[in-house]
Amino acid sequence: MAGIFKAYDVRGIYPSQIDESMARRIGRAFPAVLDADDVAHGGTRVVVSRDMRPSSEPLAAALAEGLVAAGLDVVDIGLASTPMNYFAIGHLRAAGGVQVTASHNPAEYNGLKFSKHEARPVSGDHGIPLLERVVEAGAFPAASRVGTVERAEVAEAYRRHVLSFLERPADARPLRVVVDAANGMAVVDRAIWDALGIELVPLYFELDGSFPNHEANPLKLENLRDLQAAVLETGADLGVSCDGDFDRAAFVDERGQPIGSDLATALIAGELLAHDPGKHVLYDLRSSRAVAEYIRERGGIPVRERVGHSFMKATLRAKRGLFGGELAGHYYFRDNYHADCAIAAVVEILNLLWHSGRKMSELVAPLTRYAKSPETNFEVEDKSGKMKELEAAYAGGRIDWLDGITVEYDDWWFNVRPSNTEPLLRLVCEARTPELLATRMAELVDRIGHPVDH
């Protein structure tokens, strides 16, 4: 299977690792991950959509063939962002859905993202590993019938849904916003962008799965350079960087400075809590301590969660939470089937700018309370052994194992967690001062090994 079955999705190089034959087999296997609740909720209907990569159309067609052979009824919504796929599953009351995309990966990659009813993630032992076992064994569930394929249009319903989050005052000035679509699926939401009441400055708004301008990954600072320059050149109020399937977004303030997605999570939480106080808000454990502090200050209940959309979505449901966010730029909304929606996050940032009357940099400033490292990767073969070494070395700190090892002291903390798919450990460290951060980072690097660019 060439390692294409990842923790949360299927992803690999086309056509050497993932091709039409594999997509067809995965379609045949998909009923194995749908349970009685999915069927009770959505019958045999499965939403299928795709991104703009050249390989996505043939892969989506092959996937549909496999789903139909498995007795499922395909609802094809065509070109769509991953959040639009999530919305369609809930809106059309389907049993599940599959988005053909490789997200932020380079052009030669493609993949599949899976959901159950109401956009619940396919995860855990009964998720991707089960799918892999069924595909590998060719032990496909028996089908009593051949399914059907129908086309459905959900773009207008999705537009209305996203715009329901918008709270633009009648007398508000149109904010100037530069949006770098990175030639990806944010382009498909053009009707939404145009309805926001902003002065849109579009950057790379041509669908092109070869990503001719830069990689569609807003976490890499080099991919923000054109956006930062455009914000400064146009005197914009905000910059938005989108990933390939537009389930993630990162923000740049009016000075062209990147805003950590953990801090954006806090700001969006504050805006939502103003209308709905006392609710749980999730943040991933890599986030700054300022995030939990700010959520409390704004009348919310902070909930620290491990990294990964399946954990965030499940806990958001279980806690009846209002909102959640991850350092990677995923933002989850209770009122969006508990799923992530990058453009809804943009809307909430716009609401905050309008309601506060302040500049983006002024809103972020009170949250920059600590010095924090970016997530740093280390190549480590014995990941478990290395984390145990850190546990012994920092036995004087407050230690937990929610996701990897987290060690906390009053004036600094760090988290080291293993990659699910590679021999990598990922480190985040935060301290009260830049000087203390530099000292502790040097110490941790000395213990873990030389950082790698990954």
Image (tube, rainbow, N blue to C red):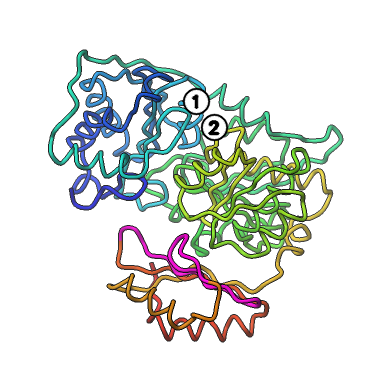
Amino acid on which disc 1 is placed: Gly
Spot occupied by residue 333 in the image (x, y as percentages of width and height): 60, 39
Q: Earlier in the sequence, mark 2 or mark 1?
A: 1
Q: Is residue 355 left or right of residue 82?
A: right
Q: Is residue 252 left or right of residue 32?
A: right
Give the magenta-colored segment's residue range: 399-421
In the rendered structure, are the residues bearing label 2 and label 1 in contact, judged by CB atoms less than 8 Å apart?
A: yes
Give the Cα distance between marks 2 and 1.
Answer: 7 Å
Near-viewer residue (32 or 159)? 32
Magenta span contains residue 400:
yes
Near-viewer residue (347 or 51)? 347
* Label 1 residue SS: helix
Answer above or below: position of 414 versus 4: below
Q: Judge the density around disc 2: few (<14), some (14-19), many (≥20) Cα neighbours within 10 Å.
A: many
Spot occupied by residue 240 in the image (x, y as percentages of width and height): 61, 50
Residue under label 1, please give it: 90
Q: Judge the density around disc 1: few (<14), some (14-19), many (≥20) Cα neighbours within 10 Å.
A: many
Q: Residue at x 69, y 35 (%)?
A: 196
Which label belongs to residue 68?
Answer: none
Near-viewer residue (239 or 401)? 401
Residue under label 2, please give it: 337
